[in-house]
Amino acid sequence: MPAFALDFGTSSTCIAVWDSSRGEAVPYPIEGWSRTVCSGDGNGVPVVPSLIHYSPGGERWIGRQVTEQGVLMQAGTFRWMKHYVGNRNPVLLPVNGRKISYLQAGEDFLSAIIRSVAAELGGVSADVALTVPVEAFEHYETWLGDIARRAGLPNYRIIDEASAAALGYGISIQPGHTYLVFDFGGGTLDIAMVRMEEGSEGGFPRCRVLGKAGEDFGGFMLDQWLYREVLRRCSLRDDDPGVAAISSRILQACEQAKEVLSYADRATLQIPTNSSAHPAEVLVTLQEFEELLEAHGLYTKLHAAIQRAISNAIVRGYPEEEIRGVLMVGGSSAIPSVQKLLRQRFGQERVYFNRPFDAVARGAAQFAAGTEVFDHIQHDYAVRHWNTRNHRYDYRVIVRKGTNYPEPEVARITIRATHEGQRRMGIPIYEVGGSRSSYDGTIELVTDGNGGVRFVEIGLEDEERRSRFWMNEESPTFLTADPPATPGEPRFELLFGIDGNKRLLLTSKDLQTGRLIHRLHPVIGLR
C-alpha cells in the first residue's frame, strides 16, 4: 500500500513519499505547484509555497502558480494559513462576491495537494501521515483529519513535527541514542528530546518522545519585527492609508531580506512609495537584524523553550548530557545567530543542519509506512467549575501534560448540584496550552482583505482564548439527575481514563440511585 506524508507549513508545504524499494522516504514534487529550495546538505528540495489564490474567473492558483501569475499581492490570495487556523482566527475575507475563512482556504489548499498526490500514487488506498506542531491544540488535529477524510483518505495518521524530524533527519540515527530536535519554521518553534530504540525484528526503529516544548512564533513573527523597523526608518505609520496600499509589498521585501541575511552580511530592501516612482532603499546589516531579534527577546525565548523540553526529559530520567546530536529543522534555523546559539550551548560537533526543509516530511512518511512513535500527553486538560467561595470559575486539572497512555484512571471527581431541582449537569472540559508565550501586549499582522496587511493588538482576552480551549462546547452536558438533585449533595461520581488512541474516557455513576450512567464513554481526543 503506498504511503506518503504532508508537512503543512506556514510558508511552504513539503510532501514526501515512502519508497519501499529504497527503504526510505523521498521528497515529492507536484508539477507546476512546487518550487525548489536549497537544503542544508546542498541538495534541492521541492516544496509547495503555502499559497492559494481565488481568481475572479473561478480558477484556483496553488503554490508557485500564485507568484507566476503575479497575484501574490492581490485580494483573493491567502497566505500564512497554518498560523491563522492554529489560532482559530475567525476572519472572513471578501473574495469575488463571497467571504472565505482561513480554515476554508487552508482546506482547499491541502485538499488539492492530497488529491493530486493520492491520484498519482494509485488512489484512496494510500496511507497518509499529517504533521502537527508540538503546541497544536486538538481542534487543529481534528481539522487536518477531517480534510483527509473528505479528500477520500480515511487511513491517515497524525505525528508531531519534532518527532517526525528525528525520524527523517539525514544522519545516521543510532538506536539507544538521544537527540534534540530544534524545529524553527515559519509559524512555530518546536523542541523535542527523543530517544531512538530498536524496532521488532526486521522492522522500523521506534521513536520515544522524552520531552517536548513549543512556542507559537516563527519566521512569520521575525518578518513582522523587521516590517515595523522598516516603517520606523522610513517615517511611515501603519495606520496611514497610503501605507496600507503598499504594505504587502513592504512585507514581501522584509521576508526576502530575512532570507538573504541567512547567508549574507547585508540586505537592501526596495521599499515602494506612493510619492515617487522610484522605490526607497533601506539597508539592513546582519548585525542590525540580530540586534533587532535580541531587542524582541528571541534568544531568551529559544533558550527557555529548549530548557523546558530538556527539563521534561530529565523528569523521566534522561539528562541533557545524553544528547548525541541536535537536529536543526525549519527555514528560520538558517539564521546565523540561531545556529551560533545552539553551537555555543551544545558544541559545534553535535549540531546538524542537513535537512531543514524536508526532514519532517521524510520522517512522517516513514511513520505512515509503519514506524512506531511512543508519545505522551502534551497539554493539561481541566474541568471548569464554579468556586462558591471566590465567586468565579476555577479549573480542576484531570489530565496533566506528560501523562503516558493508555491509562485506566487519571482522575476521579464528584459532581454536586448548584440549585434545587437541578436535572442537567454539565462537565465543561478545557484544553490548556503548556508553554505558549505569556501576554505582553502582542501585536499581530493580519491581512485586510484587499491585498494589504495591517497590525492589530491582541488583547488579554484573545490571548487567553488562544491558550485555553473549551473542548466539548457543543455538548457540555453529560449527566441527567432523575430524580432531581439537591444542592450540595454529592450526586455523580466521575472516573476519567485514557485509551490507546489518546481519547479521554468517562465512566459515571449516579450516587443516589447507584445506576451506572456511562462506561468508558469517549469524550474528547487529547494531544
Image (tube, helix red, strand yellow):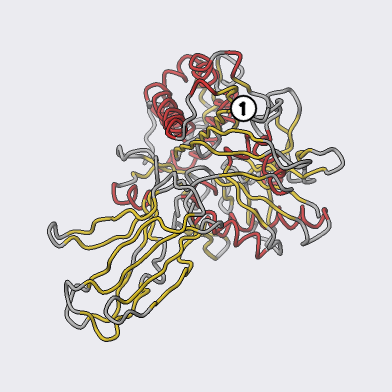
Query: With respect to residue 198, does 99 lie above or below?
Result: below
As rendered, which of 23 and 437 lies closer to the eye? Answer: 23
Query: With respect to residue 425, does 457 lie above or below?
Result: above
In the displayed structure, does residue 514 sit left or right of residue 405? left
The residue at the point 56 percent across, 52 percent down is: 75
Task: Sort mark 1 into few (<14), some (14-19) or many (20+) by Cα contacts within 10 Å.
Answer: some
Judging by the rendered image, the residue that carries numbered circle 1 is 177
Label count reads 1
Whether residue 63 can be seen here: yes
Give the image location of residue 160, x and y in percent. Answer: 57, 44
Give the image location of residue 308, x and y in percent. Answer: 42, 32
Whether residue 67 can be seen here: no
In the displayed structure, does residue 14 sit left or right of residue 214? right
In the displayed structure, does residue 4 sit left or right of residue 215? right
Q: Residue furthest right?
A: 21
Q: Secondary structure at mark 1?
A: loop
Query: With respect to residue 199, does 310 lie above or below?
Result: above
Q: Quadrant of the N terminus?
A: bottom right
The residue at the point 52 percent across, 63 percent down is: 99
Give the image location of residue 468, x and y in percent. Answer: 36, 52
The residue at the point 38 percent across, 64 percent down is: 495
Give the residue type at disc 1.
His
Give the image location of residue 188, x and y in percent. Answer: 50, 38
As rendered, which of 217 and 4 lies closer to the eye? Answer: 4
As rendered, which of 106 and 65 lies closer to the eye? Answer: 106
